[in-house]
Amino acid sequence: MKLSTRNKDACVVVFSGGQDSTTCLLWAMKQYKEVVAVSFDYGQRHKAELDCAKEITDELNVEWHVMDMSLLNQLAPNSLTRSDIKVQQEEAADGEVPNSVVDGRNMLFLTFAAVFAKQRGITDIITGVSQSDFSGYPDCRDVFIKSLNATLDLAMDYTFCVITPLMWIDKCETWKMADELGGLSLVRDKTLTCYNGIRGEGCGNCPSCKLRKAGYDKFVELYRNNN
Ligand code: ZN
């Protein structure tokens, strides 16, 4: 594709309806004229995730697509996709991978998002992965994103730009970012990050809820209490 036909005013956001990707969506809306959100149906236990994604994109008036990735569930049954596998309620020990990891998930999602983006002449792909809160997910690391970006470019003879606004910030700073983007209440009340499928504050007990709450409490303490 010729450079001139590329659409630098648009981006694709990999969107799960969670705190991180919603913050990225808000960020993208400030940076680009046209934002397209893509979500993936991989048989996640909580269809509520997709309901959230739909509601948020409706509210923000963002174009939204769902891609069928049910194959992922057949290949790699996992505590996030199978009701008969219990989600670990504790953080995995050092060097261990939690059983909520779906092998290759981010790689597949980003690859499909890239195929979709190229069809539209879009080069910029936004994902909410973060190395700061790295909890055993190897495909959230910066080295992986850079490696995949190079691979996608080679695979499709195209110049993608995989952008990770949250890579070096923690949950507290992510809350601050949502606040600065005018989306604190949207992210706090409408997103779903809980492994047990409960929106907003969530169950309060799963590793994801604990991480989210600890970040929020720190945000309130650092940036809100003295205002
Ligand atoms: Zn939870």
Image (spheres, grey):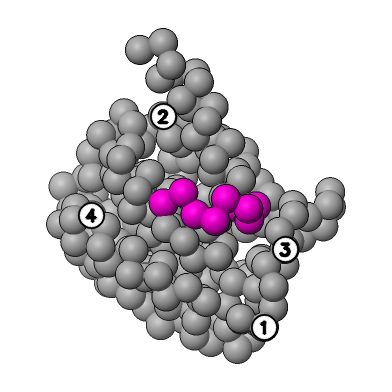
* Residue 98 versus residue 212 in the image, above or below: below
Q: Residue at x 69, y 78 (%)?
A: 85
Magenta span dominant secondary structure: loop
Residue at 31% across, 28% down: 180
Task: Tell me which amino acid carries mark 1.
Answer: Asp
Q: Nearer the observer, disc 4 or disc 1?
A: 1
Q: Which residues are magenta?
A: 200-208
Camera-side mark, 2 or 4: 2
Q: Quadrant of the N terminus?
A: bottom left
Which amino acid type corresponds to the residue marked 2 in the rendered image? Lys
Q: How many marks?
A: 4
Whether 22 is among the magenta residues is no
- In primary-sequence order, the first of circles 4 and 1 is 4
Q: Position of residue 71 (x, y in %)?
A: 53, 87
To which residue does mark 4 refer?
A: 35
User: Residue 176's mark?
Assistant: 2
Q: Residues within 10 Å of mark 3 (few under 14, many from 20)?
A: some
Task: State how far apart marks 3 and 1 are (Cα).
Answer: 12 Å
Labels 3 & 1 near each other (Cβ < 8 A): no
Provide the secondary structure element on which disc 3 rests. loop
User: Nearer the N terminus, badge 1 or badge 2?
Assistant: 1
- At label 3, which amino acid type do we have? Gln
User: Residue 39, can we see it?
Assistant: yes
Would residue 41 be found to the left or right of residue 183 on screen? right
Q: Residue drawn 57% across and 62% down?
A: 195
Up the image or down, 38 lies above or below 61; here it is below
Q: Write down which quadrant ligand 1 falls in.
A: bottom right
Q: Which residue is mark 3?
A: 88
Which of label 3 and label 2 is nearer to you?
3
| Percent coordinates x, y for residue 179 in the rendering | 33, 31
> In this rendering, is residue 4 above or below 108?
above
Instruction: Looking at the image, tell me whether mark 2 or mark 4 is earlier in sequence order.
Output: 4
